Amino acid sequence: MLGRLVDGRYEVLARIARGGMATVYRALDRRLDRTVALKAMHPHLAESADFVARFRREARSAARLNHPGIVAIYDQGLADDTSYLTMELVEGHNLRTELRRQGALPLGRALDVVDGVLDALACAHRAGVVHRDVKPENVLLERDGRPKVTDFGLARAVTEATAASTGTVLGTVAYLAPEIVTSGIADARADVYAAGIVLFELITGAQPFVADQPIRVAFQHVNDGVPRPSTRVEWLPAEVDELVAALTARDADDRPADADGALALLRRTRAALDDATLARRADVAPAVEEDGEATGGHPTDVTPLPAGTVALPIGAIHAGTPDPGPVGPARRRRRRRAFALTMVLTLLAIAGGGSWWWFTHGPGAYVTVPEVVGLPEDDAVAVLSEAGINLAVEREHHDTAPEHEVISAEPAPGDRVRTDGTVVLHVSRGILMVEVPELVGLTHEEAATALEEAQLRVGQVETPYDDDAPEGEVMSASQQAGEVIPYDQPVDLVVSAGREPVELVSVVGADTDTAVSDLENAGLRAVVEEGYHPEVPAGRVVSQSPEPGEDVQLYRGDEVSVTVSLGPQPVELPDLIGRQVGAATDELEAAGFVVEVKRVLGGIFGTVRSMSPAAGELAVPGTTVTLTVV
């Protein structure tokens, strides 16, 4: 195909991947001058007219799907007996490659990926399209990590054509819903089942069912419930177990009816989980990538057993069908092992009564450890003594078990132990109680260190402002020094933030009462001083120190000096009696006074006879001085 021009339009540039149904190429659409993915079906499929008809029908259905999480179908056709699809080229890799690189995905990332897959499937289900082959190989990841589902309808076209001619069903056995195996019929609930299997694999790093043959995997789908993910990854919460169980219920009627219902269930589950849990990832080593692993944008169904595409006879397996078991060399090896075991048992029987006594009543005999976990120590000792088992006791603190309760046993209850062996009982001393150290007066860092050394930890920390305690000093703690508390009880601290910084306001020009009030409201203390000022009216603030804008930081309770005007400073009036009115007027006006002249008998002599205010009195410049002139 390389270098060929398909349908006179698509120039094949490079091969991306090859699988059991098709080969995917990078191609150039010469008509629209864009790069596309060209998926060419293998020639043997084109020999079936039924397949070609179904392929075209399913391609048209898939092309009508318009969703950002679905790889867009651009065109389909038949060229040189090769059925092909052209579709959006996704620059990235598939979910299988991501799994091989990481081993398992963080829980939150796994839920997000399956959220995107279900969102895409929901669009298809609403349009009446069922995928039938949901698996990591058919989920492509864009460079930003967003999932896109591909191959809608392809599996259905191949399966229906194969079932009609051969009575078998094709599918990826690791993700096949039970009803596909038993009847060959699938609806939207089969896609939900497969999405649940994908979720199981993403969070645990392994598929739920593994066997040496595909038919045995199919048997497990039909007869065994999908195990809880927490049986593989212990820290997984019950909500995740319940989600996977709902999506992978063996009875299709017990699953969500379609991807919309499954998506709502997944989102409710995710909302119930905390960020710390969502960030955790199963401790699974990444797999070594296989030779030829497709890392481009459109891998097909290339997967290792048991996840590959296989043909299964429809109805060959149903509920209650016996496990087919291994065949061929494996079965022969098992027969050889059984024969060898028989010979060994025969030799043991020949060993005689001495051996029989040794293993039944002597030191070689074994007994089962009874259930003692959770019992009070005295009761557990009595149970073991009655069973004739030697015991030893080790005491240790425990967060939840009360004092003297048995926490565990070695060997564990249900295990077998020799009659001359010993069972070690681990008995609770109760939760570890520790003494609170002296904390008040220490710095925050010193207090945290003191608590850590005492096997305690800092709880909530309040940081109020305080005029007396320096910044960072512990002022109080929720427990007193010397108090004995459980080690897991946090100790809350009140740590001084130091004096509270305040913003300086300007009070220049304000009256005295307003200035004092404004400064006090700002957390400052006004120190009022008075002084004469030729221009500022009495009772108004002339200046303050410090002033706003100065490079100084004030704290609550700091002083601000305020100078309040007494008005212009009064001066002593000169003695002008006997002076000529003109000279007297000039002198007063030069000193800033206003002169008013009263003339007696016409003031013919122009001499000042009296003045008001009188000479020697204090008067503020601007005051009117009345001169009486004769």
Image (cartoon, helix red, strand yellow):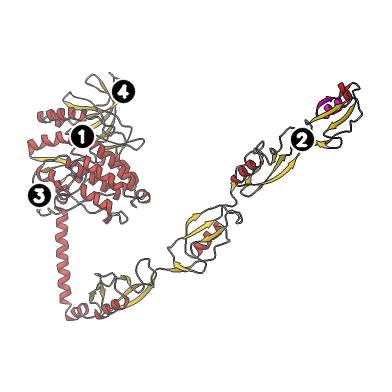
Taking 386 as reference, is 627 left or right? Answer: right
Taking 505 as reference, is 217 left or right? Answer: left
Query: What is the three-letter code of the residue carrying label 3?
Result: His
Query: What is the three-letter code of the residue carrying label 4?
Result: Arg
The residue labelled by disc 1 is 124
Query: In the structure shown, which secondary structural element does the residue marked by tag 2 occupy?
Result: loop
Query: What is the three-letter code of the residue carrying label 1?
Result: Ala
The image shows residue 611, relative to residue 402, as above or below, that is above
**Which of marks 3 and 2 precedes in the sequence?**
3
Question: Is residue 611 shown to the viewer in this render?
Answer: yes
The residue labelled by disc 3 is 318
Which is in the foreground here, disc 2 or disc 3? 2
Q: Residues within 10 Å of mark 3 (few under 14, many from 20)?
A: some
Q: Quadrant of residue 377?
A: bottom left
The residue labelled by disc 4 is 34
The image shows residue 362, relative to residue 330, as above or below, that is below
Which is in the foreground here, disc 1 or disc 4? 1
Q: Quadrant of the C terminus?
A: top right
**Which of marks 1 and 3 precedes in the sequence?**
1
Gap in angstroms between the C-alphas marked 2 and 1: 91 Å
